[in-house]
Amino acid sequence: VSAPADVRELGVKIGQGSGAPDWSGTVNLDSVDLGAASYTLLLGALGSCISMTTMLYAKRKAWPLARVIVRLRIDRLHAADCEECTHTAEGYAHRIQRSVDLEGALDDVQRMRLQEIAQKCPVHKILTSEIVIAELND
C-alpha cells in the first residue's frame, strides 16, 4: 500500500509491482464521505473472499452452484447499543451485516453447508478474531 504525503490527494495503490490497481482520486477533505472508500475496500475484500471460498468448495464437491451474491453493510454504533458486541463495552463498535444468496439447483443440505463454508473464508476469520497491528521492522 502506498499513499502520497499530501493528504489532499488521497490516492492509494494496493497490490504488488507496477501493475497494482490505482485507487487514486482527489477527495474533498470537507466531505462527510471521506472514509467511504476504505470501508468499500474492506467490504470488497470480505465479499470477494466469501464468494470465492464458497464457489471453490462447491466446485470441489461438484455441486451445481451457479452464482454467489454477497451483500454487505457496515455500521458504526455505540457499543452500549450493540447487543452482539462481546469485547467492546465503551465507545464505538463496527457491525458488518451480510447476506449470501446462492443460485443453482442445490438441495437444502448443500445450501446449509455452503452457508457454513461462507463463514469460514480467510478474511472472515481475520475480521472475527483479535487483531493486533504492530510496527513492521524491515
Image: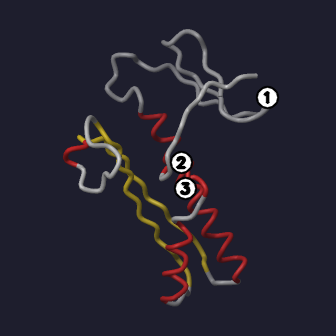
Q: Nearer the viewer, residue 11 or 89?
A: 89
Question: Relative to residue 89, is residue 68 drawn left or right?
Answer: right
Tell me the crowding category of disc 3: few under 14, some 14 to 19, or many 20 or more residues within 10 angstroms, Cα based: few
Tag count in the figure? 3
Tell me the residue that label 1 is attached to: 18
Q: Residue 35, image x and y in percent?
A: 42, 30
Q: Is residue 118 left or right of residue 98?
A: right
Residue 113 x %, y % = 54, 80
- Could you tell me if the residues under marks 1 and 2 are in contact, i.e. CB atoms within 8 Å? no
Q: Position of residue 24 (x, y in %)?
A: 58, 25
First in residue order: circle 2 vs circle 3: 2
Q: Tell me how far mark 1 sits from mark 2, CA to CA.
A: 22 Å
Q: Which image quadrant for residue 138? A: top right
Q: Residues within 10 Å of mark 1 (few under 14, many from 20)?
A: few
Question: Mark 3 and mark 1: span between their CA atoms?
Answer: 30 Å
Q: Which residue is mark 2?
A: 44
User: Circle 3 sits on which residue?
Assistant: 125
Please tell me whether residue 59 is drawn above or below residue 98 in the rendered image: below
Name the residue rendered at 37%, 47% in the picture.
74
Classify mark 1: helix, strand or loop. Answer: loop
* Label 2 – label 3 distance at C-alpha: 15 Å
Amino acid type, callout 1? Ser
Q: Nearer the viewer, mark 2 or mark 3?
A: 3
For label 3, the SS is helix
Is the Cβ of the residue at disc 3 closer than 8 Å to that at disc 1?
Answer: no
